[in-house]
Image (tube, helix red, strand yellow):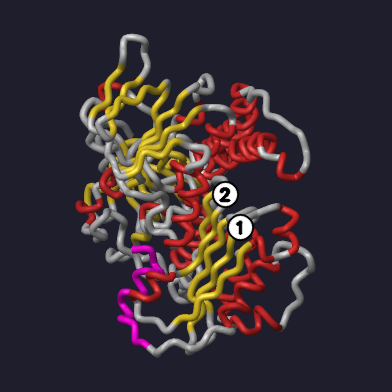
Amino acid sequence: MTGRNRRSIVLDGDVTEASNDIERYDLIIVGSGSGNSIPDFLANWRIAIVERSTFGGTCLNVGCIPSKMFVLPADKAYEAQHSAKFGIDTQFNAADWGAIRDRIFGRIDDISIGGRDYRATGTSNVTLIEGTAQFVTEKILDVEGRRITAPNILLAAGARPVIPSIPGLVETGFHTSDTIMRLDRLPERLGIIGGGFISVEMGHVFSGLGAKVTLMNRSNGLLRGFDDEVATRFTEVFSARVDLRLGHVPTKVSRRNDARISIVCGGEELIFDELLVATGRQPNSDLLDVDAAGIKCHRHGTVQVDDTLATNVSGIWAIGDVANSYQLKHLANAEAAVAFWNIAHPGDVRHQSYKAIPGAVFSHPQIATVGLTEVQAVEAGLPIKVGRRDYAGTAYGWALVDETSFAKVIVNAQTGLFVGAHIIGPQAATLIQPIIQAMELDTPAEKVARSVLYIHPALTEVVENAILDALTKPDPIPAVAPASAYDERRRGL
């Protein structure tokens, strides 16, 4: 049958008739990052995946994977320049930016292309639709003129860079984290606007590989929202290698006749070869036009979900950066597993835990964090004891000749359970793992410190001694927390 209101589509390998130009599926997934991790128990479902950009999502293509692959050579270059404290004479000569870039994306691009081809042609129950999806009504999506519907819809649409309103910025041109890692050459001078984790990771990468980096941030420090002690120490250490212009917002951006970029910041003109804007990321809920489906969002645009990942609209679910403010791939993957299970097993619902959501900043020094900061714990009214240990106070810290790194733990004095932990220094993202497990499994700090052995003289003794320091502190005056504020801190909302 032919005509405007009848057409054939491929579902489960067979040609099926769809009426009124609406293709019907059992499940629609918007986003091919964590949303692409379709479990085997959905093998018999008719599924559509909608992707508006490069297949594989943020983490694979422009986020944590390529950025950390750049961090490693930057680490090596930095170490080569700072070995004198060990009595070793080494030096850093230069970085072959093109070789580093091509090695990284030569691998990543093949994975993305392979994943796309597999979903496009290799799975009979999955249809890949490329384009931007927008809700028409509660259960109907329009993908650039192609309308699709399903009783179950999973939103895994991610987030995108925030672009600040600075005169001349758009006209001049700039990079975001989506493009900066694919530069043709290493810039001699790189300007960065922003003071979050993307800024300091890319600041480390480019300065480590030989660029002169200037970082401009409206706050008087870096890494706002991290533990105050950690953020202050990081700012102090990072300022030794990156030119920090803090407490100022650029007021004008323009392109000079020599093609370089001019930025007026704090009343001074700064000249750069390239400019990275890293002032945060915003959820893509607006691109989905979620209002048309009646889906509720938080004030900053993330879709409201409960701990089953369900929205306020029955049959619509959301995960990852479009649904929370953590912007962490490991959380998005965990949420995807819970959401898929609940979509397929409505009588056996699972819940996502937000007790212990860890994160790390792979700059130099490295940072790892889980749970509440000390300030947040105090604001929540929790009775806490804080323990701290410098790397320099352990044998392996002596070997590292480390005078700036430390571990900090926060323990609830009434329950004996961890409230949070924050580490700045080498191997931070690895060292924090025992506390993540303890928080998730409700293991008392006393047991973590005294019931297991810590290898001597491994760096894990930093964590052991930080916990012991907390346990030996006098009990604080009990306090009562406003539960809603505490819960929202844990959810990252």
Q: Is residue 107 visible?
A: yes
In the displayed structure, does residue 74 sit left or right of residue 57? right
The N terminus lies in quadrant: top left
* Image quadrant where one finds the C terminus: bottom left
Image x and y of residue 332, in percent: 48, 56
Q: Residue at x 40, y 65 (%)?
A: 309
User: Which tag, 1 or 2, sits closer to the chain's start?
Assistant: 2
Instruction: Determine which residue is flagged by label 2.
Output: 365
Q: Is residue 419 left or right of residue 5?
A: right
Task: Estimate the x, y position of residue 43 in percent, counting from the top left.
Answer: 56, 55
Seen at 36% across and 66% down, the residue is 310
Pointers 1 and 2 in contact (C-beta within 8 Å): yes
Q: Which residue is mark 1?
A: 428
* Residue 370 at x, y percent in the picture: 51, 65
Element assignment for label 1: helix
Measuring from the top left, give residue 58's x and y in whole percent. Answer: 47, 42
Q: Nearer the viewer, residue 157 or 252?
A: 252
* Residue 146 seen in the figure: no
Magenta residues, as a range?
A: 479-493
How far separated are the C-alphas under marks 1 and 2?
9 Å
